[in-house]
Amino acid sequence: MFLVVFRNRKRADMDEAAYAADAARMEQLAAQQEGFLSFKSYTSEDGEVVALSEWADEASARGWGRVAEHSEVQRRGRASYYASYTLFACDSPRVHEFTAEDDR
């Protein structure tokens, strides 16, 4: 598995409707890419967003980065949507899992 974590803060003056439309389209398009496993996004009370995408491998994640429509929306994001962001990418993250037993 290859994990991508995208932490960001939006600009106060951004066009919310345009952002929402672009975000929905990118989620739809990403899900069609080879190696896509999942995507989830969380917004904290202070406005920071953490978006997690899981890919089968690094090549799949990098392939997504080269999709022309995604590249265009990334440029628009830097120009119009994001005040700041940090991207973390991790190949073979160490995973610890827990599932509660149903029969306690």
Image (tube, grey):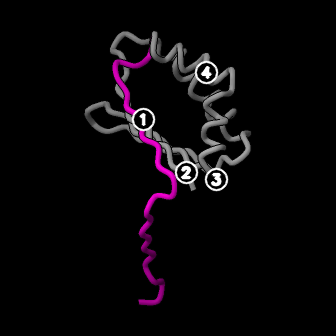
Q: Based on the displayed image, in which of its 4 quarters is residue 34 positioned?
A: top right
Q: Where is residue 52 in the image (x, y as percent from the top left)?
A: 48, 44
Badges 3 and 2: C-beta atoms under 8 Å apart?
A: yes
| Lateral position of residue 47 relative to residue 28, left or right | left
Amino acid carrying label 2: it is Phe
Residue pointed to by mark 2: 2
Up the image or down, 8 lies above or below 42; here it is: above
Which mark is first along the chain, 1 or 4?
Answer: 4
Amino acid carrying label 3: it is Ala
Q: Residues within 10 Å of mark 2 (few under 14, many from 20)?
A: many
Query: Residue at the location (67% across, 34% down)?
Result: 28
Q: Is mark 3 on a helix, strand or loop?
A: loop
Q: Is mark 2 on a helix, strand or loop?
A: strand
Residue pointed to by mark 4: 71
Q: What element carries label 1?
A: strand
| Lateral position of residue 56 relative to residue 81, left or right | right
Rounded to the nearest angstrom, the CA distance separating label 3 from label 2 is 6 Å
**Residue 56: assigned label:** 3
Q: Nearer the viewer, residue 29 or 78?
A: 78
Badges 3 and 4: C-beta atoms under 8 Å apart?
A: no
Rounded to the nearest angstrom, the CA distance separating label 4 from label 2 is 20 Å
**Residue 87: assigned label:** 1
Q: Give the range drawn in magenta.
A: 80-104
Which mark is first along the chain, 4 or 3?
Answer: 3
